[in-house]
Image (cartoon, rainbow, N blue to C red):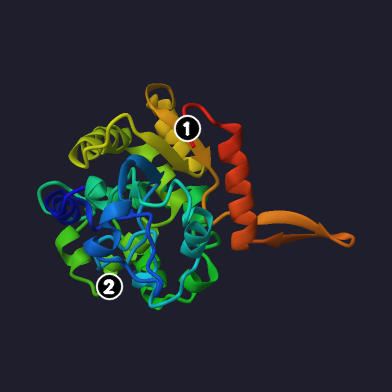
Amino acid sequence: MDEKLYNAIKEKYGKHASWAVWGSDFKVPSYKEIAGKLKPNIVFVGLNPPSGIVIPFSNYHWTYKNGNPGNDEKLKYAFEDTKFEGAYMTDIIKLDAIQDEKNGKYHKFVKFLITEREKKWFATLYKNLNKKQRKDVKLINSLKILKKISEPIDFKKLFEQKDFEESLEKLLSKSDVIMKFLEYDNNVEKESVEKFKKELKDIKSENPLIIALGDAVDEILSRNNFNLEYIYIKIPHHSRRFSYCSDTKSRYSDTKELYKEDVEKKIKEQRNGVKD
């Protein structure tokens, strides 16, 4: 891949995409460092990007996490120095698919949350936050605001509230929220699928191997026939925790070693067209 194409991809898709190459210092490598490794014909696809990405091509890397590798370290451990190193990495649902076309705001998403707030799903939303999210004062305050909003909604006033939009993006980084929202507005899925197909063309991906990262994105890709139209593999999401037995107790682990072992097993079971 020449640098001109690389930069065009970075400009258009850099806020939610990256390449499966991790620098020794755990930062996003430069083009010169990875030029000979890029493989646009292998494409990892997740569900949705996390919040807080600023540096282009840092999704699936941990630069945006202030040095905390989190689950992204498992991807590096599983795929570095393999035939999958250098693959393109992206997400099927981008934030711009959820934003309103006219103003770039999340009016539609707010309407969804308000529609759902009297139902059991919204009531359990707080319980499904992780420990870090439960301590996030901005996020919790925004949930309280959403609970009190009445119709008609004054969107201008709502989005003028400090940190409100940032908190919505944090909610949109949760897979259960995204999947519930897709039930509410299935046009987002349809549009996202078409945009993803265009993304494949834009990166000059020919007869690509599509690798679905986890159950949620596999559900979307499969019902849109990617598993039939492309060479296709599903592997566990890198946030997955693995159960094992220690003495007489069942325990859970999320070690990178267990993840690598499970990924290798799943790929071996789904060889369909994957060449060594």
On the image, the x and y values in percent for residue 239 come to 53, 57
**Residue nearer the viewer, 181 or 200:** 200
Of the numbered discs 2 and 1, the one sitting upstream in the chain is 2
Placement of 68 over or under 85, stated as above or below: below
| Mark number, residue 138 | none
To which quarter of the image does residue 26 belong? bottom left
- Viewer-side label of 2, 1: 1
- The residue shown at (29%, 53%) is 36
| In the image: residue 88, left or right of residue 236 | left
**Residue nearer the viewer, 29 or 239:** 29
Is label 2 in a helix, a strand or a loop? loop
On the image, the x and y values in percent for residue 64 come to 34, 70
Q: Amino acid at mark 1?
A: Val
Q: Residues within 10 Å of mark 2 (few under 14, many from 20)?
A: few
Q: Amino acid at mark 2?
A: Asp
- The residue shown at (29%, 34%) is 193
Residue under circle 1? Answer: 274
Q: Is residue 102 visible?
A: yes
| Mark number, residue 163 | 2
Mark 2 and mark 1: Cα distance apart in space: 45 Å
Q: Is residue 17 visible?
A: no
On the image, the x and y values in percent for residue 219 come to 47, 34
- The residue shown at (45%, 75%) is 68
Q: Residues within 10 Å of mark 1 (few under 14, many from 20)?
A: few
Residue furthest top in the image: 228
Is label 1 in a helix, a strand or a loop? loop
- The residue shown at (31%, 67%) is 28
On the image, the x and y values in percent for residue 218 come to 47, 36
